[in-house]
Amino acid sequence: MTDYTRAFRLDGKVALVTGAARGIGAEIARALAQAGARVLVTDVADDGGYGTAQAIRASGGTAEQVLHDVTSEPQWEAAIATAVRNLGGLDILVNNAGIERSAMLSQCSLEEFKQIHSVNVEGIFLGIKHATRAMSPGGVAGKGGSIINLSSVAGIIGVAGHGAYSTSKGAVRALSKSAAVECGRLGTGIRVNSIHPGLIPSTDMGTKFVDSYVELGLAPDREASIAALLALHPIGRLGEPSDIAAAALYLASDAAKWVTGSELVVDGGVAAS
């Protein structure tokens, strides 16, 4: 008989969460730690997410932090080596780090387009590459595990003024499915899934997204921008970081042991409407 309380626990597991200095990444790191995981927090800011790791430790959890540029392959290798050496392995990778820039396609520079894809797609590719090496049988961790890639509802539907971001997140969606099939066929014991958040206005990225509607002339002021974006969410409210962290916890846990290649849309109904 399944013990559903234990199914959602992560005791004895090690997680690496990128872009975890603040916002959704920080909330995911805290959620995984509360469920019992030892967490390596990584970021290019805040000394690698020191504040997040410190908060986890202050709450009785186990966490370390490292500076980590997800576009650097050597830094990926170093981050995973740190997780294995200092925390005892690698069972969960949350590819959360990402950037967003607003511009109409006719005004978006090739440099901006490439930068967004470098972080949002190449960064996740490198994470998948090195995590699967570590988690696969014979790897330095070698017990399989769960890889969770943060995409966006913008990777499913079109969003005016955010074409570069949308295409990067669409690529994450497809990459996650390809990795899931590959890992499954090769018998690695690794599950790969993507999460597609709607608007989370309390984060830095969410704030910039709201403001971009005004900057691009899609709304006359910030209040109108929020009202227009809220109207896209049939559930009647905008999202919170905890909504996404709960989804990540599920996919990281054994409660989702038969879930791979899935896209978990956590968007208040935007994609359905």
Image (cartoon, helix red, strand yellow):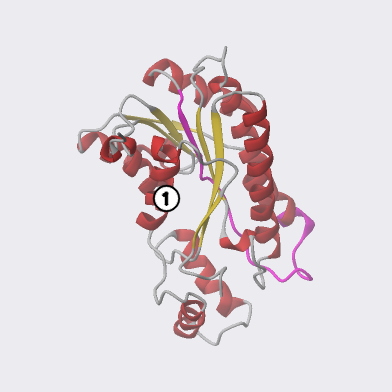
Residue 180, given in percent of the width and then of the height, sits at 62, 37
In the figure, 73 relative to 248: above or below?
Answer: above
Residue at the limit of the structure toward the top, as seen here:
138
Q: What residue is shown at x 29% (from left), y 29% (from top)?
A: 62
Residue 134, given in percent of the width and then of the height, sits at 55, 20
Q: What residue is shown at x 33% (from left), y 24% (from top)?
A: 12
In the displayed structure, does residue 107 sit left or right of residue 270?
right
**Is 110 one of the magenta-colored residues?**
yes
Residue 155, given in percent of the width and then of the height, sits at 64, 59
Work out whether residue 74 or residue 252 is closer to the camera in this orientation and state it.
Answer: 252
- Screen quadrant of the N terminus: top left
Work out whether residue 40 or residue 237 is closer to the camera in this orientation and state it.
Answer: 237
**Is 146 one of the magenta-colored residues?**
no
Q: Mark 1 — residue? A: 247
In the figure, 36 relative to 224: above or below?
Answer: above
In the displayed structure, does residue 218 sit left or right of residue 249?
right
Q: What residue is shown at x 56% (from left), y 75% (from top)?
A: 273
Crowding at dot 1, Cα within 10 Å, few <14 / some 14-19 / many 20+, comes out as some
Chief secondary structure of the magenta portion: loop
In the figure, 186 relative to 138: above or below?
Answer: below
The image quarter in which residue 191 lies: top right
Q: Give the magenta part as a residue range.
A: 90-112
In the displayed structure, does residue 143 sit left or right of residue 103?
left
Q: What residue is shown at x 57% (from left), y 57% (from top)?
A: 152
